[in-house]
Image (tube, rainbow, N blue to C red):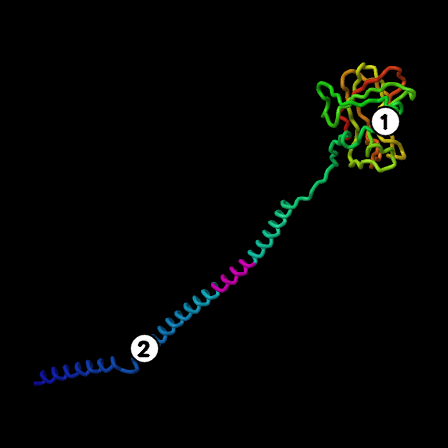
């Protein structure tokens, strides 16, 4: 009987312990004891989440803003700089290329033919008495550039004992009117001359004296040959402007007729 009572009490005690365990599991204090875990979890998660989001947001916004501002600024600065430099460079280069400064250089004198500008109208000496004849007769092959007319002059000595011809501008002008204005830059008067016999002595002229032209130049007396030969008179050291006597010749000291040919007379 006592054995049964002990056994009953043992099971009763075990039941009370089980009930107490169940009640402990539902104890509000134990539930409040879990608050630190929940709080820690919430704080950790929330903090992490906020920090992560905030950092990400700030970093993203800041990066985006900086990148946008920096990009805009760089783009503006770079664009302005490139535009300014490129524009200046292109404008400078293009302007220089398109509008080069002209170089005038030395004055180039275009050959000026005497015939057609001046006229062989100034007969002198025996020429004033119709003792000089001028005809257009050329050599078989015209010498030089063949500018102007071919001249064959025949002088028959008379009472004057000499004769000659001036090329005048205008025709018949002996200095009472202005002459032909020659451009600057001429250095010589050139021409070809030859004779029928080859012993003709002739002096060639340019400039009708100080009153008419302000200068007068003469070649040395030359003895012509039967072949065309070029002769020149240096005009580079005279100040010419409006020239009345563009060219001329004189001869004398003969008793027999003189025949000479002249061709390609030019200022150059």
List the residue tagged with mark 2.
34
Q: Which mark is residue 123?
A: 1
Q: Earlier in the sequence, mark 1 or mark 2?
A: 2
Q: Using the image as rendered, state which of residue 263 and residue 31 is in the foreground.
A: 263
Q: Is residue 26 visible?
A: yes
Q: Which residue is drawn at the image coordinates 37% and 71% (left, top)?
A: 45
Using residue 20 as the reference point, say whether residue 199 is left or right of it.
right
Q: What element carries label 1?
A: strand
Q: How crowded is mark 1: few (under 14 residues within 10 Å), some or many (20 or more)?
A: many
Q: In which quarter of the image is residue 247?
A: top right
Residue 93 within the magenta-colored segment of the rendering:
no
Residue 33 in picture, x, y percent from top left: 32, 79
Measured in 3D between alpha carbons, the distance from the residue under mark 1 to the one under mark 2, in whole angstroms, is 147 Å
Residue occupying image coordinates x 73% and y 27%: 147
Query: Which label sits on residue 79?
Result: none
- Against 20, residue 193 (above or below) is above
Above or below, 7 relative to 143: below
The segment highlighted magenta reads 64-76
Which residue is more in the foreground, 103 or 157? Answer: 157
Going 47% across and 63% down the picture, which residue do you hit? 64
**Residue 43 location (% of width, % of height):** 38, 74
Element at badge 2? loop
Across and down, in percent, residue 189 comes to 79, 28
In this rendering, does residue 220 appear at all? no
């Amino acid at each position: 009987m006592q054995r049964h009572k002990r056994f009953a009490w043992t099971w009763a005690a075990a039941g009370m312990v089980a009930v107490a365990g169940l009640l402990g599991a539902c104890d509000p204090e134990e539930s409040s004891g879990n608050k630190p875990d929940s709080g820690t979890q919430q704080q950790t998660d929330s903090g992490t989440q906020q920090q992560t989001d905030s950092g990400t947001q700030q970093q993203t916004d800041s990066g985006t803003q900086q990148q946008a501002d920096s990009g805009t600024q760089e783009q503006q600065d770079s664009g302005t700089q490139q535009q300014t430099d490129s524009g200046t460079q292109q404008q400078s280069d293009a302007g220089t290329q398109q509008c080069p400064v002209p170089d005038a250089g030395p004055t180039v004198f275009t050959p000026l033919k005497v015939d057609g500008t001046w006229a062989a109208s100034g007969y002198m000496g025996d020429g004033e008495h119709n003792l000089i004849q001028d005809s257009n007769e050329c050599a078989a092959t015209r010498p030089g550039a063949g500018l102007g007319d071919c001249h064959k002059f025949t002088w028959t000595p008379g009472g004057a004992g000499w004769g000659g011809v001036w090329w005048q501008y205008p025709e018949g002008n002996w200095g009472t009117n202005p002459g032909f204005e020659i451009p600057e830059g001429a250095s010589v008067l050139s021409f070809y001359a030859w004779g029928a016999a080859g012993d003709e002595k002739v002096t060639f002229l340019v400039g009708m004296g100080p009153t008419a032209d302000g200068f007068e130049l003469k070649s040395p007396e030359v003895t012509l040959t039967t072949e065309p030969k070029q002769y020149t008179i240096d005009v580079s050291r005279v100040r010419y402007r409006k020239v009345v006597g563009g060219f001329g010749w004189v001869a004398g000291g003969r008793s027999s007729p003189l025949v000479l040919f002249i061709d390609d007379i030019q200022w150059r």
